[in-house]
Image: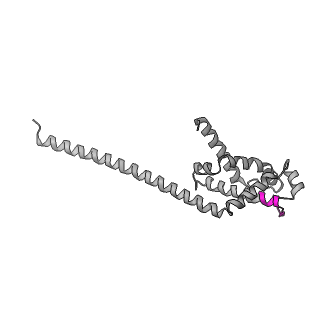
Amino acid sequence: MVDFQTVSIAIASASVVAGVVYYSLLLRNQNRQMELQNKIRQADLAIRINLWLNMSGVEFTQMNMRFSAIEFKDYEDFVKKYGPLIGSDSPESVSFHVTSNYFDAVGVLLKRKLIDIDIVGDLWGEYAIYAWNRREPLIRGFRKQFNMPREWEPFEYLANEMKKREQNLQQKGV
């Protein structure tokens, strides 16, 4: 026969186990809520910063299309055809600066972990890589000419992180 002490020990043990399970479930739910809140904050930041990043979709698209249509071999060829990157208000130079600064700002957000890499990838992904590759000769020439080795560094960081992300997605078959 089971005595009173054994029953009370079993009830106490079951209560402790139930408490631990409840607390574990509560912590897991709290972590999910925090992750959700972080994603909401990141989305809000992306929306707000996109507006701050200076232009509407139409303006950015026009600047980006203008720059994409420019033909140049390298930095020197660009400067010869369209003028210097500093001190010139040529449409080509302006389109370079506006679009490069836009991606530079996105790179700052990513580097400082203020925006999730998957959000950035979904918004800009492969295009950020293309944009960097297209502008890289000008940026490298600018850095060399003006001895500014870190100019547009966040843009370069953005492109490198997007390359890594694309490689990871390809390896996973996504």
Numbered circles on residues, count? 0
Name the image colouring: one colour
Residues 51 and 26: in front is 51
Image point 59% across, 35% down: which residue? 173
- Lateral position of residue 151 relative to residue 87, left or right: left
Residue 168 spot, x, y in % from top left: 61, 39
Residues 9 and 167: in front is 167
Instruction: State which quarter of the image contains the C terminus.
Output: top right
- Vertical relation: 156 (above or below) 174: below
Corner quadrant of residue 145: bottom right
Residues 165 and 157: in front is 165
Residue 142 spot, x, y in % from top left: 81, 54
Magenta-span inclusion, residue 28:
no
Which residue ends up furthest to the front in the rendered image? 58
Image point 62% across, 43% down: which residue? 165
Residues 104 and 145: in front is 104
Magenta-span inclusion, residue 93:
yes
Instruction: State which quarter of the image contains the N terminus.
Output: top left
Image point 84% across, 48% down: which residue? 74
Which residue ends up furthest to the right in the rendered image? 80
Image point 62% across, 51% down: which residue? 123
Which residue ends up furthest to the left in the rendered image? 1
- Lateral position of residue 28 relative to residue 123, left or right: left
The magenta-colored residue range is 86-95
Residue 147 spot, x, y in % from top left: 80, 55
